[in-house]
Amino acid sequence: MNQIVLPVVLPLLAAFLMQPLARVSRLAARVLGPVVLVLCAFIVARLWLNYGDAPFMVSIGGFAPPLGIVFYADHLALIFAFAVPIFSLLFWPGLGDRDSDASHLARRDALVLLLAASGTGLALSGDLFNIFVFYELAAVASFGLASLSGTTRALVATLRYLLISAFGSALSLVGIAVLYMKTGTLNLADLAQVTPHTLQGPLGLASFALMVIGFGVKAELFPLNGWVPEVYATAPARVSALLAGLVSKLAALVVLRLLVLVFHQPEASQLLLVLGVLSILTGELAAWRARDFPRMIAFSSIGQLGIVFIAFSIDGDAGLLAGVAVALHHLIAKSALFGLSVRWNGSLEALAGAARRAPLAAGLYVLLALSLIGVPPLPGFWAKILVLVGLAQGGSALDLLALIAILLVTAVEASYLFRVAVRLYSKGDSPPAGHAAWDLGVATALGAVLLVSTLGIAPLADSLRSVARQAGDAALYVDTVLPKTVARKD
Amino acid sequence: MIELDAVINLETLVYVGAIGLVAIGALGLALSNHLFRMLLALGIAESGANLLLILSGYRPDATAPIIGYGPVGASMVDPLPQVLVLTAIVIGVGVQAMAVAMLVRVFRVYGTLDVRELRKRMELEVSTAAGMPVPTSEQAPAGERPLPPVPAYRPSYGPIQPRES
């Protein structure tokens, strides 16, 4: 089980080997990234299959927690540790892409590998220090990737993204400082033990708010998500798919861990709920107004992530189950949509008649749109209904407000997603070019995953329920990371 | 009446200063329209956060956390926040260097760093690249905050030309 560090270490190593290797052999440098990612996915899958049900912990360098740094792997962490290399591979910029110029390939591949390494690290890390470092690493890698096209508009968008993101990091650093002042530890398991009697009240809430807003930059959460449409409109579509699909979920996972382990108090949940509602309202209404395809799905992803945070605010395992379900569904559906936007990167008007040129892509779009809206047999419906039922059971005024907001924006969502579907199937003079085989293949595979999970929704729900129960079990986390209760001297 | 000495001591002042720096940085980011000034404001906010972190491990009567340094048995300041701050400073420097590099490239092409102007140009380019009609004032949403008039930006030395080699 020590191998669990390899999915973080190997891509990091490969990223730094990339440049020298490219000088020796360009071909070796091109295949290095995909090979490493396949290896990482294989390692995680093998660990997952062999290691059974209980979560496990690896202390880096053999230093025992709470002083040492730990990786904690439960099912949820392993799902994401598996999804990171898989999705990085699916949206690997060099695959099936013949026409890109060869000059910056090594640099670009190294950045994607850095993103994969830091993403896996974020999923597995068991202390805030490491989470902060991996988060920053992911941020820097995504700055590089967002400005990959080298156009000035991409640079302007990236600059604004950088300013917002770095400011968010400063805020979360302030939050971490407050947390450390009150508790004297940054290990999540240790924090879970001490926070119930050290971090109640306004100071704890302030610390949580700062961290949620800070980590919420990547998770496209309400106050600091102004970068989303600009970056997704100017970055390469595959990079947008990675950022919107994968990185945002990892930031949401960090917030989930903080909520379950450190800030387990009703005020914190309410804060998440309010931010989530503001996210879905602003995101979906802006998506309704958007007039080009990339920005429409970018705004829509703000809305979907808002639903994830609303779900996290629901008390107990039901909320976690709903949040994880929405997050995984969005990971699959929105990544596939961004995959389609590789060629459909223009205005919505220009999509007229695209169904004739690319019938499969148009069919996929309709499937994904239906699932995003939440039309019954598809997984998106089950994810959304979990959130709605959870909110209805919560029953407070805020919960009901969120429920109404979700229903309202679902109507808005249906309106703008179908507007595009109608345009796809209408007559047009100059439909956009068909998709490259790789992009279409990836989107088809993700759509097929959605369909298969529709058929197997009952066993899927059962396994997700056990994943959520494990993720919500703070005592299990503490027992796993700190096996014998360390006598704390206060 | 509250005794002033109990409320305002040095420690409180430093705390207020640290949080004040973060607030100044936030205000600078929100109110400034010049990208370079926003970058400077970001630097101020980051120093505030770093100062606050250092304070979280600071003890007035302690020495540096090095074994063999200072008298035996003396208390030491907490090294963990210092390590964290070191990391944060390094990351901050890297990010700011990257930002300055991008700033230079943006300035070479557009000849301005005014955010409103840059966003307008970016919007224009995105729309043109996407094949959309350029948004005009009639199509602009009614709810958007009207901007104060942009002062005519006249760089004293014009857009930097790429150096001829």
Image (cartoon, coloured by chain):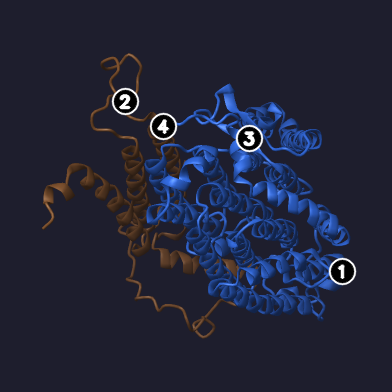
Chain colours: A blue, B brown
Q: Earlier in the sequence, mark 1 or mark 3?
A: 1
Q: Secondary structure at mark 3?
A: helix
- Say which residue label 1 marks: A359
> Label 4 marks which chain's residue?
B
Tag 3: residue type? Thr
**Residue A201, position as x, y percentages in the image:** 40, 55
Q: Along the line of sight, which residue is nearer the eye, A420 or A313?
A: A313
Q: Secondary structure at mark 1?
A: helix
- Report crowding for label 1: few under 14, some 14 to 19, many 20 or more residues within 10 A (C-alpha): some
> Label 2 marks which chain's residue?
B
- Determine the image quadrant of residue A334: bottom right
Circles 3 and 4 on the same chain: no
Residue that appears at 28% across and 20% down: B74
Question: How far is disc 4 from disc 1 in space, using C-alphas?
Answer: 58 Å
**Residue A228, position as x, y percentages in the image:** 56, 61
Picture layout, residue B105 above or below residue A416: above
**Residue B43, position as x, y percentages in the image:** 35, 47
Quick check: marks 2 and 1 in contact, CB under 8 Å?
no
Question: How far is disc 2 from disc 1 in space, using C-alphas?
Answer: 69 Å
**Residue A181, position as x, y percentages in the image:** 37, 42
Residue that appears at 60% across and 70% down: B128
Q: Secondary structure at mark 2?
A: loop
- Say which residue label 2 marks: B76
Q: Residue furthest bottom?
A: B138
Tag 1: residue type? Pro
Q: Nearer the viewer, mark 2 or mark 3?
A: 3
| Residue A445 seen in the figure | no
